[in-house]
């Protein structure tokens, strides 16, 4: 009896990309700590060079990526209606990309500033711990989502854990300025995530309206 795997080459590539992205994101704070010791770069400079490096990698991937043949593009993709919808949404997409880029800059630069002020461990825990809380509150306010009993317990537990971390440390490693930068970073991350969700729902509504 043979067991067939549901995994496809596309699934394997997706998992590989997730691992690479997680490694790049997870080591950003540690790399920032080392660069602070070895150079005079600040949070904004680190964000700039990190984004510039990522842009170079993406351009290199696009340069070597195989492009689909012209015949592979179905006739439905070039219909007049699809072209019209794409043209109408072009400027909105540009604005969304600019807003996402600005919020990403805020999120990353504030996180690097928190690492410099209060250390890698505290900056990471506060940023990651408060981010989901802010996203949940934003979803409740902007999209009318109900947290539910489990969501309320999760938010309350996260807030309690952050309070213990900030108020319960007697070693002087938790600095208020660093915590403030971490909260600002989490706010940028939450706004970026919430903005993308809102834009996706708006895009779906636009497609349903046009078709």
Image: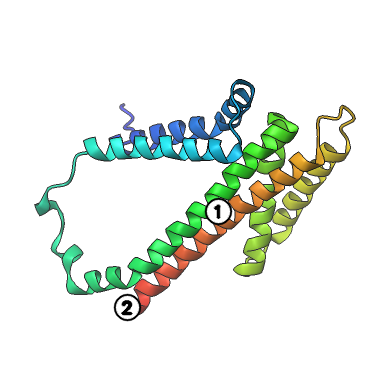
Q: Residue at x 66, y 68 (%)?
A: 141
Q: What is the quadrant of residue 11 in the picture?
A: top left
Q: Which percent across, then down, holds residue 159?
A: 78, 48
Instruction: Determine which residue is flagged by label 2.
Output: 210
Q: Nearer the viewer, mark 1 or mark 2?
A: 1
Could you tell me which residue is drawn at 45 percent across and 31 percent down? 19
| Mark nearer the N terminus (1 vs 2) | 1
- What is the number of the mark on residue 103? 1
Within 10 angstroms of label 2, few (less than 14), some, or many (20 or more) residues? Answer: few
Q: Is residue 196 above or below residue 163?
A: below
| Secondary structure at numbered mark 1 | helix
Q: Quadrant of residue 210?
A: bottom left
Question: Where does the image place residue 26, in percent across and percent down from the top left?
Answer: 56, 32
| Horizontal side, residue 42 vs residue 167: left or right | left
Using the image as rendered, state which of residue 2 and residue 68 is in the foreground. 68
Residue reaching furthest top? 38
Query: Taking the image as drawn, is residue 129 in sight?
Result: no
Cα gap from disc 1 to disc 2, whole angstroms: 30 Å
58 with respect to 121 (left or right): left
Farthest residue to the front: give it: 40
Image coords of residue 145 (percent x, y): 63, 66
């Amino acid at each position: 009896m043979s067991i067939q795997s549901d995994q496809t080459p596309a699934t394997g590539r997706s998992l590989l990309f997730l691992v690479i992205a997680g490694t790049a994101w997870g080591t950003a704070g540690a790399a920032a700590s080392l660069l602070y010791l070895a150079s005079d770069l600040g949070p904004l400079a680190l964000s700039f060079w990190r984004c510039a490096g990522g842009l170079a990698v993406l351009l290199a991937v696009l340069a070597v990526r195989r492009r689909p043949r012209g015949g592979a593009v179905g006739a439905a993709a070039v219909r007049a209606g699809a072209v019209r919808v794409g043209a109408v949404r072009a400027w909105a997409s540009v604005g969304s990309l600019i807003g996402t880029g600005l919020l990403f800059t805020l999120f990353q630069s504030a996180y690097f500033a928190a690492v410099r002020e209060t250390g890698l461990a505290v900056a990471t825990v506060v940023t990651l711990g408060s981010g989901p809380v802010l996203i949940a509150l934003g979803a409740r306010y902007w999209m009318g989502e109900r947290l539910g009993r489990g969501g309320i317990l999760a938010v309350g537990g996260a807030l309690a854990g952050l309070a213990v971390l900030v108020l319960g440390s007697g070693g002087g490693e938790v600095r208020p300025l660093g915590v403030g930068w971490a909260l600002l970073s989490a706010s940028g991350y939450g706004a970026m995530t919430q903005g993308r969700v809102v834009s996706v729902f708006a895009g779906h509504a636009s497609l349903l309206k046009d078709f």
